[in-house]
Image (cartoon, rainbow, N blue to C red):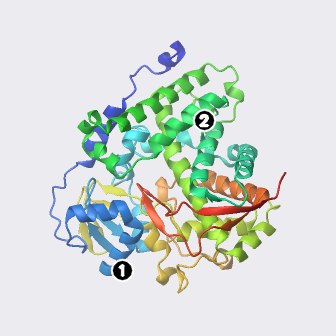
Amino acid sequence: MSTSAQHASPRRPATARERLARSASISKMPITEPMDRMPPGPSESVARQTVRFRRSRQHYLTQMHDRYGDMVTLRVVPGGPFVLLRDPEHIKEVFRGAPDVFHAGEGNSLLVPIVGRHSVLTLDAPEHRPARKRMMPPFHHERISQLVVAMQELAEREALSWPVGRPVRLLDRAYALTLDIMVRVVFGVDDPGRAAELGAALRKVADIGLSDILVWIRPGLGRVWPWTKVVSGLERADELIYAEIARRRTDPRRSERTDVLSMLLEGEPDDEVVRDEVMTLLVAGHETTAVALAWLFERLVRHPRVLARVREGLDEPKDPYRTAVFKEALRVRPVIHNVARRLTEPIELGGYRLPAGVSVLPSIGAVQCDPRLWGPDARLFRPERWLEGTPPQNAWIPFGGGARRCLGATFAQVEVETVLAAVLRAVELRAVDPGDEGSAMNHITMIPKRGARVSVVRRLLP
């Protein structure tokens, strides 16, 4: 690392092992008060509840709500017990609750090994507000609009690389594309070799399996195979990111650059702070956006009428119907099925007494498809509903809500709509498999079970 970078970071950055230890200590916070007034929940073992929550929460949470009501207690490790919420009024109370009582940072403690201790995802009051304010400038509409052309070019190039007449796993291609956008547009790495190396390292970090999470609970496993690869993957990503930060600090053109990394370096913050911020963007903006794209195309190719109408508006920079399709796809196929807030003191909610240490989890998938709120066609993909009236309050929450609403929500929407339009201008697609594609949990995201398989019918651009 360069001398200037070392000078900018007087503190030694936390290592991957230290971040793992911190995550484990937060997730083990005890509950010292009685739990006799908690909502009802399943009586099955903690192990079974944990496995079902980790592997199939897209089905499990809705099943539990249908069986036990709008508030359900789950005993899950690490981080539990959890109280699931489906009622929009309860969700509003949580999102609008005092930040020093409803700790979202502690609710996201499992992310500490990846995003670090300075991330807006893992910080709580009072540190969270200034950190969030520091990250807001790159997400202003004007800054985002400067990146659209680069997104379009990368998306068009990606789509034109797909073979005609052969199945393509769109999820895999969306992972590659959004990572390319992340490395080149967000990180601003324009050297092909460095971009490929950094992209590969970041993809390994993002691709965390269920068994890998064991090292989050017991950091000592990081010295034992196969968990050593988890730690080494984090360390390699750290090494490359710190190298990019050092390189950018000495770049004489830094003030002219429009990439997010250069913007984050304004004000000369610690290297570790910047590292945590860019890793936050990876977690919040790479995998989730890729999965959203895969589901959006999966829905479109199975609804030819909707696809045809989207094509009619491709020449419109801001087509309302394209936005309606984006919102509807996230409604019926949410990428994330819950967000979490850990209580720092007891609260009364929905007639129950919830003790400090419990985490409350708004159930995104359950509330977004609740027939009581969305009508008898709640589970149908019908984008027109977004053009017909005002949606139910606090019932569309794919980006969370309140002071902790996802900072990159606008960026994600612009990216998805930009990629969607660019791909449809470049190629004509159809579904490979009949019927709706099932879903599967991939650590915290719900992905198309077969990878959103599509086929290119023909190329529309030379």
Residue labelled with disc 1:
66
Task: Give the image quarter of residue 363.
Answer: bottom left
Foreground of the two, 32 or 259: 259
Q: Toward the viewer: 249 or 389? A: 249
Q: Is residue 20 left or right of residue 296?
A: left
- For the residue pair 215 and 266, the one nearer the viewer reads as 215
Q: Residues within 10 Å of mark 2 (few under 14, many from 20)?
A: many
- Residue beneath the point at 49% across and 76% down: 369
Residue 12's place in the image compared with 113, above or below, is: above
The relative height of residue 277 versus residue 453 in the rendered view (above or below) is above
- In 3D space, how far apart are the residues under numbered discs 1 and 2 (Cα atoms)? 44 Å
Q: Is residue 270 visible?
A: no
Q: Which one is earlier in the sequence, the residue at label 1 or at label 2?
A: 1
From the top left corner, tell me how far across and down residue 107 is, in percent: 35, 53
Q: Position of residue 164 (x, y in %)?
A: 73, 57
Name the residue that disc number 2 marks: 187
**Amino acid type shown at disc 2:** Phe
Residue displayed at 24% across by 57% down: 356
In x, y percent, where is residue 332?
54, 71
* Left or right position of 332 against 140: left
Label 1 neighbour load within 10 Å: few <14, some 14-19, many 20+ = few
Quadrant housing residue 69: bottom left
Q: Secondary structure at mark 1?
A: helix
Give how far across and how far down residue 77 sits, in percent: 25, 56
The relative height of residue 433 versus residue 293 in the rendered view (above or below) is: below
Residue 183 is at least partly visible in this image: yes
Amino acid of disc 1: Asp
- In this view, which residue lies farthest toward the top? 3
Q: Which dot marks residue 54?
A: none
Question: Furthest-front residue in view?
Answer: 166
Q: Residue furthest bottom?
A: 376
